[in-house]
Amino acid sequence: MKRFAVALMALVWFALPVQAAVEIQDITTPGGIKAWLVEEHSIPFTALEISFRGGTVLDRPGKRGEVNLMMATLEEGAGEMDAQGFAKARDALAASFDFGAYSDSVTISARFLTENRDDAMQLLRQVVMEPRFDQDAVDRVRGQVMSILRNAETDPGDIASKAFNAMGFGAHPYGSDDNGTFDSVAGLTRDDMFAAKSRVMTRDRIYVGAVGDISAQELSTLLDGLLGDLPATGPELPKHIDPALTGGVTVVPFETPQSVVIFGQKGLSRDDPDFIPAYIANEILGGGADSRLMREVREKRGLTYGIGAYLVAFDHSELIMGQFSSGNGSVSEAVDVVKQEWAKIAADGITEDELDIAKTYLTGAYALRFDGNGPIARILVGMQMDGLSKDYIATRNDMVNAVTLAEINRVIKRIYNPETLTFVVVGQPEGLQTN
């Protein structure tokens, strides 16, 4: 029976004929916690997604990596249960809990059957309110983080990311690894875990999405019981920072047959009125298999197996970024082609045909995101954190279709700047000019 329940949780989903079918209830609990809910009672299962704004940017000076280590150690025992006892209790309920640490948020994802809802939430409450952070658990997870850091030292992609972030953001938290450094992680204590939890899990920064077999009243009671006793407020968040990217190519020597390239420039925030046109423009330039960069760098010249570009809207900064790998003998040409395409779109914009194709793809693909309770719960939280309205799901495709060629070309001229496009190349590139 338990095996069947776990399988049910892994497979459960409900069909949505169109995005507009997602009916979102906006609730506020008696304790003041706000949440978005999509009720779906056809299957006795609920997905609950909780995010706290802040994340690893709230690491204290000299304590880089404390939030990441804390979140990774959360379920290693709670209340009277050690790590093994907690795991057994969770599995007996066929519940699933996942904990994540990111630059701008920490997350709790819970999946549970209706019949076990109360017990599952009581178990999760012990994690949230009574984590043990036993020394042996902290040391064990610390070892896992150290292994990740060691592997990153020999991974060209990680090396490139580290160099690019340091170049763009310096001493700001965005400029260093969320995992921390060898020295900072080695120095973290059990007391630091409790301190980190109290900094990032506060009621003023909670965002909740719930989808499944639960009513508004039931969710309200659940949330106050689960989160109502957390600290009221958290520490001040970092200030906004513009990425210090001024253009040029930096090479980080590393012995490998293929060079890894990360490139980028300043972008725009998610609440910028030009974000939707910028999103479409990025799709055309580097967002998918039919993008200009894929066509010019891969299909026409065979310089890479894949290349992509994407908008990065941090809470406190913005980027347009891209990445690819290429042989050491061909990476110089590939970098030149990217520069040319960046300059070309900035100068000439796009065509009506490109805009129509991108609109068709983006509007058609949007509904595919809503393929299960869990993904929808995450989307609900993301919408709240981005400051979007409840009707965004129903109106998003209309906004994409409303973008005109004149509008998108105006936005392209505004945001794409070939002069500040910055490249970090990790490898042994041949004939690549740096500056």
Image (cartoon, rainbow, N blue to C red):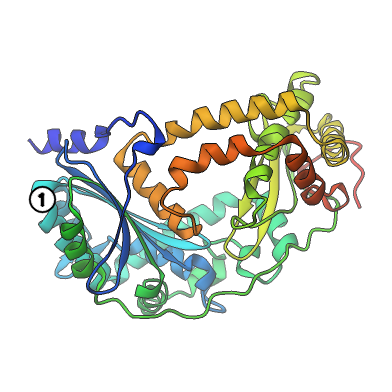
Observer able to see residue 208: yes
Q: How many marks?
A: 1
Q: As drawn, is 45 to the left or to the right of 320?
A: left
Q: Quadrant of residue 393?
A: top left
Question: Where in the figure is residue 13, as x and y percent of width and height?
Answer: 27, 34
Question: Where in the figure is residue 151, as x and y percent of width and height?
Answer: 55, 49
Q: As drawn, is 413 to the left or to the right of 397?
A: right
Residue at screen point 24% across, 65% down: 127
Dot 1 surroundings within 10 Å: few (below 14), some, or many (20 or more)? some
Viewer-side residue, 120 vs 167: 120
Question: Where in the figure is residue 339, as x and y percent of width and height?
Answer: 85, 39
Observer able to see residue 251: no
- Secondary structure beneath dot 1 equals helix
Q: Is residue 185 above or below residue 402?
A: below
Outermost residue on the top side: it is 300
Question: Where in the figure is residue 289, as x and y percent of width and height?
Answer: 64, 25
Image quadrant occupied by the N terminus: top left
On the image, numbered disc 1 is attached to which residue? 116
